Image (cartoon, coloured by chain):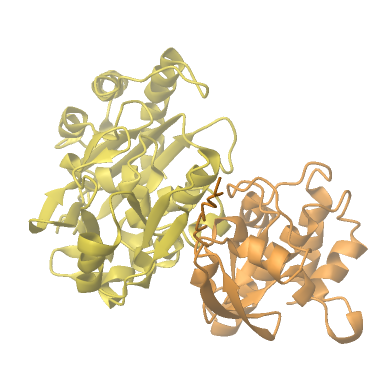
């Protein structure tokens, strides 16, 4: 046996491939920047790759505006999130996360769908999408459905998709209609600046009215738990407060609430203690961004 | 005793047809389904300028342009290059071996030491120049790129001997010349 590659050209063909052609031992591949090194590293010799980048569907590769916000196809490349002006304007957190992901060469092929489906606890784009409380349009054998990203990850490298489910699109909800100022960004800490897998990451998207009152907050943390986590109580704590008038004690309490969602492990990149300390510190950094 | 010869049928790995244009030349090839673009360039087309390094997209020594976009050829399935235009470091050189603007900049600034990363650096630099020119042309980018912007562009290209200073110098000079 060997590594085979199947390239279905539309969704019905993909379903047919899943039913008949792929056998049991298969994996989906999009950009391939995660799958291909894994194959080489684990010396995998028997696998069928189902390449979904051949799917001939415009929506699968485009970012489109719709009544509820923006819909990004799962095949949209990470670089497209950087060059898309509207994404940069309305969701700086997503642009910053995309910019911090790997390198230019990787961003030209890596996809949003890949970053979500690989379900790494340190996925950058996935962390930003969690802070935005995006919706995931998925196709399961039982049919299509919509799942919140908050329920998408089920464990380290595990998602609700199982083996045969497919992510089709990501829905990024529209900002609050009274939102006039955004404090939105992505803070990533690693041992170097480029090509680094996060030791800790924090995605935040605070929508404030003209005076600075936080109308809606989204906070997500990466690399400090088995999955990326949405820090709901921390986000709710900020809502209703004025971003320019938050006191030191409140910042501290906010950081404690965020830390409540962290259950890091010690590994070759950092110890659990270090990850927590860094997470606490970058929580304060969030408020420094508000002044800018 | 009658000797029985057991015939073992060795299943040949299926190959697929691939047609692509490399440095302006069209090729129609038979490749393994999971062959990487890097391996096709080096082992089938014998274009050894593109270097294999880490095989995981970290070092960028294998960078080539696919339809003018820089990618790691070690992470690119060759079958995806079907119908596409590939540029390797060999393709930068003009007729009669004339050095391109990128190559000249690297030579003039002495931005090469052991040379292993150089093909990838040259291709990334060409991509930077192309993007810069097209931004200027379309009127989207009127401001010049800062040194930090240039550094950011090269984050996917590792060099273990130059310390990057002269490489960044070469890129800065190249962009200034293209103004």
Question: Compared to A273, does B42 lie above or below?
Answer: below
Q: Position of residue B32 (x, y in %)?
A: 54, 65
Furthest residue toward top: A273
* Residue at the image position 56 percent from the left and 45 percent from the top: B1
What colour is chain B?
A: orange
* Residue A166 showing in the rendered view: yes
Q: How many marks?
A: 0
Residue B173: give x, y in percent of width and height: 80, 65
Q: Which chain is yellow?
A: A
Residue B20 picture quarter: bottom right
Question: Residue at point 22% right, 52% down?
Answer: A164
**How far across and how far down the image is residue B83, in percent?**
53, 82
Report the side of A150 relative to B111 (left or right): left
The percent position of residue A44, horizontal first and vertical second, equals 48, 44
Q: Please identify the quadrant where the C terminus of chain A is shown.
A: top left
Q: Is residue A273 left or right of residue A9?
A: right
Which quarter of the picture shows residue B70?
A: bottom right
Decide: is A289 above or below A170.
Answer: above
């Amino acid at each position: 046996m060997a590594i085979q590659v199947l390239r279905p050209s539309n969704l019905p063909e993909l379903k047919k491939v899943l039913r008949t052609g792929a056998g049991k031992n298969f994996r989906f591949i999009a950009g391939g920047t995660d799958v291909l090194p894994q194959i080489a590293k684990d010396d995998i010799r028997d696998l069928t790759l189902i390449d979904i980048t051949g799917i001939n569907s415009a929506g699968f590769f485009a970012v489109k505006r719709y009544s509820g916000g923006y819909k990004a196809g799962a095949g949209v490349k990470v670089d497209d999130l950087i060059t898309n002006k509207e994404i940069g304007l309305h969701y700086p957190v997503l642009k910053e996360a995309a910019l911090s992901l790997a390198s230019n060469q990787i961003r030209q092929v890596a996809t949003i769908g890949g970053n979500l489906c690989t379900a790494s606890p340190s996925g950058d784009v996935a962390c930003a999408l969690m802070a935005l409380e995006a919706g995931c349009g998925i196709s399961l054998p039982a049919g299509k459905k919509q799942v919140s990203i908050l329920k998408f990850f089920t464990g380290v490298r595990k998602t609700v998709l199982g083996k045969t489910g497919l992510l089709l699109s990501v829905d990024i909800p529209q900002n609050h209609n009274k939102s006039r100022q955004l404090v939105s960004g992505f803070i990533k800490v690693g041992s170097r600046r480029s090509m680094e897998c996060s030791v800790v990451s924090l995605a935040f998207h605070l929508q404030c009215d003209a005076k600075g009152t936080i109308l809606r907050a989204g906070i997500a943390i990466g690399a400090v738990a088995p999955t990326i986590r949405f820090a709901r109580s921390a986000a709710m704590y900020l809502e209703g407060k004025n971003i320019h008038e938050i006191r030191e004690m409140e910042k501290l309490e906010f950081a404690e609430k965020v830390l409540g969602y962290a259950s890091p492990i010690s590994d070759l990149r950092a110890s659990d203690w270090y990850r927590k300390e860094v997470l606490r510190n970058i929580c304060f950094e969030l408020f420094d961004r508000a002044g800018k | 005793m009658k000797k029985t010869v057991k015939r073992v049928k060795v299943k040949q790995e299926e190959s697929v047809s691939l047609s692509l244009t490399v440095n302006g030349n069209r090729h129609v090839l038979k490749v393994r389904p999971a062959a990487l673009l890097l391996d096709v360039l080096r082992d089938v087309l014998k274009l050894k300028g593109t270097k294999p390094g880490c095989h995981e997209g970290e070092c960028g020594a294998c960078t080539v342009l696919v339809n003018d976009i820089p990618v790691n050829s070690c992470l690119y399935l060759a079958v995806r290059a079907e119908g596409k235009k590939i540029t390797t470091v060999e393709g930068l050189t003009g007729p009669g071996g004339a050095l391109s603007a990128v190559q000249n900049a690297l030579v003039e600034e002495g931005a090469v030491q052991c040379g292993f990363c150089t093909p990838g650096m040259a291709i990334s630099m060409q991509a930077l120049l192309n993007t810069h020119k097209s931004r200027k042309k379309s009127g989207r980018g009127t401001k010049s790129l800062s040194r930090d912007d240039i550094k950011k562009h090269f984050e996917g290209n590792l060099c273990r001997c130059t310390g990057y200073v002269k490489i960044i110098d070469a890129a800065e000079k190249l962009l200034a010349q293209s103004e």
